[in-house]
Image (spheres, helix red, strand yellow):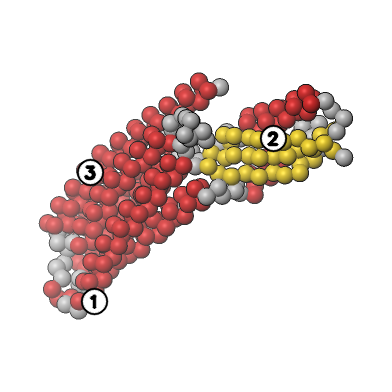
């Protein structure tokens, strides 16, 4: 069982590393293209979008480190494993996103409230073309990363996927702003940067909240707990359930359950029933890492 677990962790780590390396290369290329286009075409929205894409490179590196550390086996100092380190990586990612968004938003507000709209340069058509490329590329990265995040059940990788989508949304905002500026409203380029700020902060908040929920032993959703309850009660020797508690540890689930059995059973018989319940839950719920089954005698 332990050997299989190590093999699965290794496969997950390889998949996550492959996804991360591909998206890092893609974001480096995209960031350079956006930055050059923003400078050449005089678009502050495109430069802001380039900064956002550049932050994706750093965030993906953080995700790679988090996933690698979370995959480490349990040891004496960490008997329950290292899964929560993936949540730490997600929290760091959320903070990077927020700081990036704050810088973009502050610059946009400065331009909007300056009142000197005539000094704002109208972006060139190159910025429009690059914005379209960015939207397609980042949406593709989102679906690619999301697919593997769901395959290996990685909250940090899923956070990185949403980071890619927030970049796609920000590129849509840049496209609208650049288009508006070229139609004779230069302020629209800065307004687009402000919209980008909103998308980034929203993504940062969602990632942060999800990671914190997993850090503070948040219980499973009601549907999952109901399925576990029904799974336990399928054992004909279980006469009732006195307690069922779940908690999310990183991306894994821990289960504590107290079952009622016939009080006349021997200790060995009661133990066998508990063992059966344990194995049934383990077989039916792949996210469950640890199960504690306590037996109470039925009065």
Residue drawn at (28%, 65%) of the image: 105
Tag of residue 113: 1
The reply, left or right, for residue 14 in relation to residue 50 is right
The residue nearer to you, when weighing 73 against 176, is 73
The reply, left or right, for residue 136 in relation to residue 107 is right
Q: Which image quadrant for residue 127?
A: bottom left
Q: Which image quadrant for residue 27?
A: top left
Mark 1 surroundings: few (<14), some (14-19) or many (≥20) residues within 10 A: few
Viewer-nearest of discs 2 and 3 = 2
In this rendering, the answer to whether 189 lies above or below 169 is below
Per the image, label 2 sits on a secondary structure element best described as strand
Per the image, label 3 sits on a secondary structure element best described as helix
User: CA gap, disc 2 to disc 3?
Assistant: 50 Å
The residue where tag 3 is placed is 28
Residue drawn at (74%, 27%) of the image: 271
Precedes in sequence: disc 2 or disc 1: 1
Q: Residue 34 placed where, x, y %?
A: 20, 52
The residue where tag 2 is placed is 293
């Amino acid at each position: 069982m332990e050997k299989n677990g190590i093999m699965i962790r290794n496969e997950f780590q390889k998949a996550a590393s492959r996804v991360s390396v591909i998206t890092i290369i893609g974001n480096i290329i995209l960031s350079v293209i956006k930055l050059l286009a923003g400078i050449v075409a005089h678009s502050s929205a495109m430069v802001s979008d380039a900064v956002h894409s550049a932050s994706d490179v750093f965030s993906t590196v953080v995700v790679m480190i988090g996933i690698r550390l979370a995959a480490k086996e349990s040891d004496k100092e960490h008997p329950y494993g290292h899964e929560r380190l993936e949540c730490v990586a997600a929290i760091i990612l959320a903070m990077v996103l927020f700081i990036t968004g704050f810088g973009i938003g502050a610059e946009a507000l400065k331009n909007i409230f300056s009142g000197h709209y005539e000094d704002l340069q109208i972006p060139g058509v190159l910025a429009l073309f690059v914005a379209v490329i960015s939207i397609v590329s980042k949406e593709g990265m989102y679906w690619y990363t999301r697919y593997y995040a769901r395959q290996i059940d990685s909250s940090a990788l899923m956070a990185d996927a949403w980071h890619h989508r927030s970049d796609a949304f920000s590129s849509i905002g840049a496209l609208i702003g650049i288009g508006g500026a070229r139609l004779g409203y230069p302020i629209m380029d800065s307004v687009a940067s402000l919209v980008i700020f909103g998308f980034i902060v929203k993504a940062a908040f969602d990632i942060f909240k999800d990671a914190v929920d997993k850090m503070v032993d948040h219980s499973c959703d009601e549907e999952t707990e109901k399925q576990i309850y029904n799974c336990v009660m399928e054992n004909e020797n279980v006469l009732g359930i006195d307690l069922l508690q779940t908690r999310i540890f990183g991306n894994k689930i821990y289960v504590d359950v107290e079952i009622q059995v016939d009080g006349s059973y021997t200790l060995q018989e009661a133990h066998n029933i508990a063992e059966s319940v344990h194995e049934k839950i383990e077989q039916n719920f792949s996210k469950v890492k640890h199960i504690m089954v306590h037996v109470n005698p039925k009065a």
